[in-house]
Image (cartoon, grey):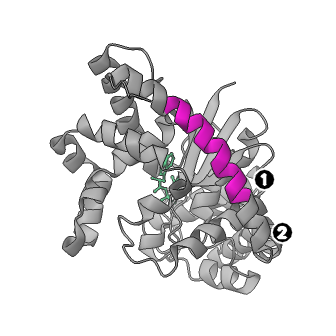
């Protein structure tokens, strides 16, 4: 069975970008594939050196994963830092990762701009750790949003390079996966390109109905089209892209027609959008509260996930050591 791997950084609650870009695919894939989903707490240290409580944050995401429908009986669900084997693979991949290519990645450049006082080596080698996460399981399919494309390219490059350097055909090149076959980018509703925690424009799965409505009603728009069938400016296109993701095709078409004949009222469109978002979020919200209330259960699930992940990981590390040429005395 094909192996699927993906993770999310626990730098805050899950937002709609995480959900529609990744978690919804996790839930569907767990039925068909051998899935390993983790919480990338080590990755979050690259931007959050002192998370208030890294353990609590990881458990929050775990409760949210479960509330979204991830099933620990079907998928291996674990916390990255519970599986230290990944660090050894990270080290090997780092030995074959070059400064120039790491410095050129967009996310590194972006983060370096955002936190000029903390351009740390972890930030630079972020793609190597991400590749290690995937290759540790010999993952071939990786459900991620559009923003991860460059990291995925790096993962393929590191896999290929390992094979070439050691003259083996060991790692397959992992491919991004999205539900409809098209990478998802959930836009920000503040006129910015994408919804993201560092952009402060997130609608969270945890948000209550009123908060969702408030955030959506604040979305940036313009004064409306004056010519029939005119091209949509970016902020309006964002609103439509959002609707395409969360609403039914009929609803989308309805508002698209109103736009095209210049009779659209953005207030109505936003109300519909808020209602459609809430329809997704409401049942998940309730389940988050339930799962969060039972910390013992969360700990049990994390422990069981880590045990399973470590078994797979140990096998890969043993094989990788052999390929590189380490012969331990053990
Ligand atoms: P992270 O934590 O930033 O985001 C987690 C997942 O959510 C997706 N996502 C989005 N998708 C569409 N539109 C958006 N606005 C949006 N915002 C976030 C991301 O694409 C991602 O799939 N590097 C990863 C974490 C990671 C990982 C891995 C992923 C570490 N190791 C191994 C896959 C495999 C990250 O920072 O995601």
| Quadrant of residue 212 within the rendered picture | bottom right
Quadrant of the frame with the C terminus: top left
Residue 20 visible here: yes
In the picture provided, is 330 more to the left or to the right than 160?
right
- Residue in the foreground of this view, choosing between 151 and 190: 151
Q: Residue at x 76, y 33 (%)?
A: 32
Residue 238 in the image: above or below residue 182: below
Chain part drawn in magenta: 301-316
Q: Residue at x 20, y 75 (%)?
A: 117
Q: Main secondary structure of the magenta part?
A: helix
Q: Residue at x 74, y 65 (%)?
A: 298
In reply to whether residue 258 is colored magenta, the answer given is no
Mark before the other along the chain sequence, 2 or 1: 1
Classify mark 1: residues with Cα within 10 Å, few (<14), some (14-19) or many (20+): few
* Residue 97, x across and y down, in percent: 25, 38
Q: CA distance from mark 2 to mark 1?
A: 23 Å
In the picture provided, is 297 more to the left or to the right than 18?
right
* Residue 234, x across and y down, in percent: 44, 62
Q: Residue at x 62, y 64 (%)?
A: 16
* Residue 221, x across and y down, in percent: 51, 75
Helix, strand or loop at mark 1: helix
Helix, strand or loop at mark 2: helix
In reply to whether residue 304 is colored magenta, the answer given is yes
Residue beneath label 1, please?
250
Residue 183 in the image: above or below residue 114: above
Residue beneath label 2, please?
283
Q: Nearer the viewer, mark 2 or mark 1?
A: 2
In the picture provided, is 309 more to the left or to the right than 71?
left
Which residue extends farthest left? 100
Which residue extends farthest front? 329
């Amino acid at each position: 069975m094909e192996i699927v791997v993906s993770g999310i950084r626990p730098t805050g609650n899950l937002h709609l970008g995480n959900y529609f870009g990744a978690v919804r695919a996790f839930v569907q894939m767990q039925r068909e594939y051998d899935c390993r989903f983790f919480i990338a707490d080590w990755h979050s240290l690259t931007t959050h050196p002192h998370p208030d409580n890294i353990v609590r944050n990881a458990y929050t995401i775990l409760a949210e994963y479960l509330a979204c429908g991830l099933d620990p009986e079907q998928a291996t669900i674990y916390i990255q830092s519970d599986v230290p084997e990944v660090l050894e693979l990270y080290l090997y991949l780092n030995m074959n990762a070059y400064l120039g290519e790491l410095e050129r990645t967009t996310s590194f450049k972006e983060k370096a701009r955002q936190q000029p006082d903390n351009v740390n080596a972890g930030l630079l080698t972020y793609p190597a750790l991400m590749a290690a996460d995937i290759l540790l399981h010999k993952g071939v399919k990786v459900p991620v949003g559009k923003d991860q494309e460059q990291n995925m390219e790096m993962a393929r490059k590191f896999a290929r390079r390992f094979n070439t350097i050691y003259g083996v055909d060991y790692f397959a090149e992992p491919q991004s996966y999205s539900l409809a076959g098209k990478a998802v980018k959930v836009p920000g509703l503040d006129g910015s390109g994408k919804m993201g925690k560092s952009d402060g424009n997130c609608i969270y799965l945890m948000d209550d109905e009123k908060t969702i409505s408030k955030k959506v009603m604040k979305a940036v728009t313009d004064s409306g089209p004056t010519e029939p069938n005119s091209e949509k400016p970016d902020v309006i296109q964002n609103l439509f892209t959002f609707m395409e993701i969360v609403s039914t095709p009929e609803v989308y078409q309805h508002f698209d027609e109103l736009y095209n004949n210049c009779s659209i009222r953005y207030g109505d469109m936003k109300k519909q959008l808020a209602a459609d978002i809430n329809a997704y979020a409401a049942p998940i919200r309730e389940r988050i509260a339930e799962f969060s209330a039972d910390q013992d259960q969360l700990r049990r699930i994390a422990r069981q996930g880590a045990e399973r992940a470590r078994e797979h990981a140990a096998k890969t590390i043993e094989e990788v050591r052999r390929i590189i040429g380490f012969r331990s005395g053990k």
